[in-house]
Image: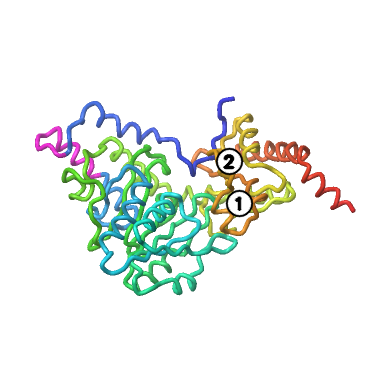
Amino acid sequence: MKTKIYLDNAATTRTAEEVVEAMIPYFTENYGNPSSIYELGQRSKEAITTAREQIAGVIGAKTEEIYFTAGGSEADNWALKAACEAYEGKGRHIITTKIEHHAILHTCEYLEKKGVEVTYLNVDENGLVDLDELQKAIRPDTILISIMFANNEIGTIEPIKEIGMIAKEHGILFHTDAVQAFGQLPIDVDDMHIDMLSSSAHKINGPKGIGFLYIRKGVKIRSFVHGGAQERKRRAGTENVPAIVGYGVAAKRAAETMEERIAKERQLRDYFIERVEKEIPYVKLNGHPTKRLPNNINFSFRFVEGESLLIMLDMKGIAGSSGSACTSGSLDPSHVLLAIGLPHEIAHGSLRLSLGEDTTKEDLDYTLEQIKEIIQRLRDLSPLYEDFMRKEKK
């Protein structure tokens, strides 16, 4: 069945029509290399400058502090690896959390093999970092704190401003993976004391394959890709002009619609969460009840396998995702859900739904009815559920 209801906007979003329209001329007409001095190349260069201005404006940054990358994962890799290299004379210790995206966690694993020491902070049952634990983790040789702005699975928004203040007080660089937050939440890099910030266009109705790393002026970060002099000699390679243009338009569009979009998504999110908690037994909401992304819904259903739930929803024309990594070939449940204290058997029965600008109340009503039916069918097939109900009746 063709997908009728798309509720996986945390994974990727539909590229907006105006974004596509803005990109097309840079494939077919204004296709010059931005490094060229003739007019066709200069048109591309000007387009990149405009996009950089549009993106910088969303987070209160200077235009020259925005560096384009191939996506959020590259930006995360660049921030951590280059910071450790540039500041190794000061120390070789960094701090992150146990619930980061794998672009951070796997980079940290790589750095540990290179002799960097990494402290992985715990989070509470809602996914929030303990600021006292962060303070205690800081050492004289700590050079970087990297904590995500908002979690991609459970939607919890971290106390970024407070973390930034702690980092600044200790003279430590602060990087945040804001892939889920950029264009979704208000961000001010100066007010929040953010030194580096990662983002990706396809999370905000922009094209795939383009992201940026914000690097505060004065931060010593070396080149990540060597070659030409692009991106002020910090990232070599001919710029992806159409994608950069699309990112600029998507960022401007997201900023202009943010307030209205947040209000709408929060209302729909809370409506759906309330109905699920009232109408489906043995369910747990994952993530902070209020300090969460406006479009994020994440539930664990007892006595249910998340993979089965996803497949059956897909058969009903609904696209969602699971907190479990089953669909990627792993039998291990989500590291995020384990970090907030869920036992394996409950973490495996998780469902993440992420709303988008096209989501309607009717979509959610239909989705809920299908979930209720599927959950009951799966539980009826579960020996664990049968045993549980037998004991409940005694």
Instruction: Name the image quarter holding residue 39.
Output: top left
Colouring chosen for the image of the structure: rainbow
Mark 2 residue type: Cys
Give the number of marks.
2
Q: Is residue 17 above or below residue 339?
A: above
Q: Which residues are magenta?
A: 35-50
Mark 1 residue type: Asp
Q: Nearer the viewer, mark 2 or mark 1?
A: 2
Left or right of 246? Residue 261 is right
At which x and y percent is residue 20? 35, 32
Residue 224 is a magenta residue: no
Q: Is residue 161 above or below residue 197?
A: below
| Residue furthest out toward the right | 394
Give 274 or 87, whichever is nearer the viewer.
87
Left or right of 123? Residue 168 is left
Answer with mark 2 or mark 1, whichever residue precedes in sequence.
Answer: 1
| Residue furthest out toward the left | 37
Counting other residues with Cα less than 10 Å from the Cα at mark 2, is it few (<14), some (14-19), or many (20 or more)? some
Give 369 or 108, whichever is nearer the viewer.
108
* Helix, strand or loop for disc 2: helix
Which residue shows up at 49% across the image and 44% down it? 10
Give 380 or 357, whichever is nearer the viewer.
380
At which x and y percent is residue 183? 40, 49
Which residue shows up at 60% across the image and 32% down it? 314
Q: CA distance from mark 2 to mark 1?
A: 27 Å
Q: Is residue 105 above or below residue 331?
A: below
At which x and y percent is residue 170? 35, 74
**Disc ID at residue 389:** none
Residue carrying label 1: 270
**Disc ID at residue 326:** 2
Question: What kind of secondary structure does the magenta stretch mostly adopt?
Answer: helix
Left or right of 263? Residue 30 is left
